[in-house]
Image (cartoon, rainbow, N blue to C red):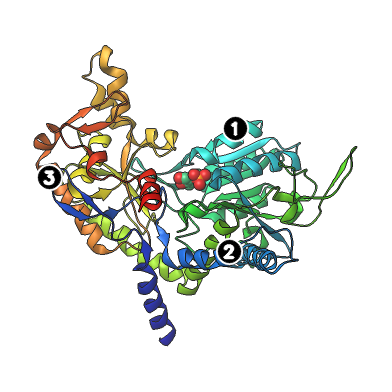
């Protein structure tokens, strides 16, 4: 009991301490209000503790790869701690797994692993992925695996659910001995629907395939256990995630992979830090991890910030975070589906189809871009729209409505209309969101659905197919520029 109370207190403290919770913008109606940030699935806000830890670390900042002077020693030690902390957070046994950081988020990590997996087992040329994947967990496999098969999703009277395990097993059986790996997302970045990653791992392993998890939307929202399962088939071979979706902007992507898979594959990037000896005629790659996978100077502050955020999440407890955020998702699902004219995508029953962090919807008859623009300009609610880099998944879910909506459009305007209607609006949540944010979203959507004509008349579509307010200039009203900041610094 005491432990739970302490955790609640910590959660409340951390939730109230993010950079950007007080950001105020001027709206199209002239009013100023505090931004409601519902775009965490794209990038989360920065955790105060991670910000402060990195700021403190800057006093000691120096390059790693040396322990001779005090600062280099401190930097190297803290950078090493960041790797260890991520492994322990994900319950990945450090004897078996390594963690290394990559340049550009999850995308870089999955590209690396698609090539590694191909070279690890060149005779097994098939990759199985689900139909709900982000392009970053689809295109790298198309590029590196000889054949990619998209596994369909469960369907509940036409509503999409998580990956269909029977269909997965069918493909594993049909292609036995040829499937190199199964790569699936832990959580959809569109609907927030959670995949049963350990069941998927068990199936994959039973048929001799490896398992790669896209953890971009998973790691900040659910507990993860990569190793130590009673049934070792449920262990995860590799997982990738992004710091900028885990409360630390701009930080690196992180790859956690069984060392045995990487051991005999030449690292993709070569240069300083990953070689033992270099001669004119040859070089010797280091055998130790993570060094051999991290050529060049790494993003040291980014990695330290990320490990700090993760340490704080761990101290709160990921079960508690999942429950806390689950209340938000459930409340959003329940309230928004009751608004006449709103379609929420995916199976709506949270018990059948649990979700984390995101829901996506449309107002029937209104383009996703217009809904998102009105939410921003009149309600100060930051959401994202379009296809969220998951074109096949989004198009599958909106296809019927899309065809219906474009039925009456003439040929000349078809392409434009198709584009404007091809997408959804996504509201997504992080540790800092509260039920009052959901209320605000609900009220805003009621307002929009009741005043559709009035709002629509305020907008036009610009040459880049974005909805723009006819008179309100967003950039002028809410100006921020780094160049101005520097001018003030220099001249102030
Ligand atoms: C599920 C999923 N996978 C991969 C990515 C790519 O992540 P990054 O942009 O950090 O490379 C995203 C980004 O939105 C995502 O949501």
Q: Which residue is mark 2?
A: 90
What is the crowding at mark 2: few (fewer than 14 residues within 10 Å), some, or many (at least 20)? some
Please name which of the two marks, 3 or 2, marks the residue nearer to the observer: 3
Name the residue at the front extreme: 491
Q: How many marks?
A: 3
Q: Nearer the viewer, mark 1 or mark 3?
A: 3
Q: Is residue 237 left or right of residue 343?
A: right
| Mark 1 vs mark 3, CA separation in Å | 47 Å
Horizontal relation, residue 9 to residue 362: left or right:
right
When the figure is inspected, residue 247 is found, relative to residue 470, above or below; the finding is below
Residue 202 disc label: none
Q: Earlier in the sequence, mark 3 or mark 2?
A: 3
Rendered view: 88 above or below 45: below
Ligand 1 within 8 A of label 3's CB?
no
* Residue 35 location (% of width, % of height): 26, 54
Q: Residue furthest bottom?
A: 2
Residue 260 image position (x, y, % from top left): 76, 54
**Residue 140 in view:** yes
Please provide percent x and percent y for residue 199. Answer: 56, 56
Decide: few, some or many residues near mark 3? Use Cα within 10 Å; few <14, some 14-19, many ≥20.
few
The residue positioned 48% from the left and 65% from the top of the image is: 50
Point out the image quarter for the N terminus. bottom left
On residue 29, which mark appears? Answer: 3
Which image quarter: residue 326? bottom left
Dividing the image into 4 quarters, which one contains the C terminus? Answer: bottom left
Disc 1 designates what residue?
142
Looking at the image, the residue that sits furthest to the top is: 412
Image coordinates of residue 34 in percent, x first then y, are 23, 57
What is the C-alpha distance between the residues marked 2 and 1? 28 Å
């Amino acid at each position: 009991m005491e432990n739970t109370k302490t955790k609640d207190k910590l959660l409340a403290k951390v939730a109230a301490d993010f950079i950007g919770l007080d950001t105020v913008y001027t709206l199209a109606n002239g009013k100023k209000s505090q931004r409601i940030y519902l775009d965490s699935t794209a990038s989360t806000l920065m955790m105060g503790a991670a910000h402060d830890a990195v700021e403190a670390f800057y006093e000691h900042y120096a390059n790693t790869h040396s322990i001779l002077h005090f600062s280099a020693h401190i930097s190297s030690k803290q950078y090493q701690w960041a790797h260890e902390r991520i492994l322990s957070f994900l319950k990945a046994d450090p004897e078996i797994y390594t963690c290394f950081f990559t340049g550009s988020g999850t995308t870089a990590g999955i590209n690396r692993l698609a090539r590694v997996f191909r070279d690890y087992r060149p005779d097994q040329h098939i990759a199985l992925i689900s139909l709900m994947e982000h392009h970053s967990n689809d295109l790298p496999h198309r590029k590196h695996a000889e054949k990619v098969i998209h596994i369909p999703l469960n369907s509940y009277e036409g509503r999409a659910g998580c990956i269909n395990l029977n269909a997965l097993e069918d493909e594993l059986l049909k292609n036995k001995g040829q499937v190199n790996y199964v790569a699936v997302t832990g959580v959809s970045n569109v609907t927030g629907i959670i995949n049963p990653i350990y069941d998927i791992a068990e199936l994959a392993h039973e048929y001799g395939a490896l398992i790669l998890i896209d953890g971009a939307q998973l790691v900040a929202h659910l507990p993860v256990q990569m190793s130590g399962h009673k049934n070792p088939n449920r262990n995860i071979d590799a997982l990738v995630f992004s710091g900028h979706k885990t409360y630390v902007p701009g930080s690196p992507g992180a790859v956690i992979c069984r060392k045995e898979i990487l051991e005999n594959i030449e690292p993709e990037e070569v240069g300083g830090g990953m070689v033992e000896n270099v001669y004119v005629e040859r070089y010797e790659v280091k055998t130790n991890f993570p060094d051999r996978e991290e050529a060049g100077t790494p993003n040291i502050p980014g990695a330290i910030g990320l490990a700090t955020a993760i340490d704080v999440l761990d101290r709160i407890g990921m079960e508690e975070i999942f429950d806390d955020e689950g209340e938000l998702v459930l409340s959003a699902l329940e309230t928004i589906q009751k608004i006449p004219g709103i379609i929420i995508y995916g199976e709506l029953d949270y018990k059948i189809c649990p979700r984390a962090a995101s829901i996506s919807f449309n107002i029937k008859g209104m383009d996703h871009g217009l809904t998102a623009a009105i939410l921003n300009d009149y309600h100060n609610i930051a959401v994202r729209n379009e296809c969220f880099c998951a074109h096949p998944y989004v198009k599958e879910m909106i296809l019927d409505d899309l065809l219906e909506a474009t039925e009456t459009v003439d040929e000349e305007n078809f392409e434009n209309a198709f584009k404007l209607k091809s997408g959804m609006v996504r509201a997504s949540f992080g540790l800092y969101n509260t039920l009052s944010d959901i209320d605000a979203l609900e009220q805003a959507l009621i307002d929009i659905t009741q005043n559709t004509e009035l709002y629509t008349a305020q907008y036009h579509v610009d040459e880049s197919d974005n909805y723009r307010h006819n008179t309100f200039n967003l950039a002028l009203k809410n100006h921020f520029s780094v160049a101005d900041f520097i001018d003030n610094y220099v001249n102030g």
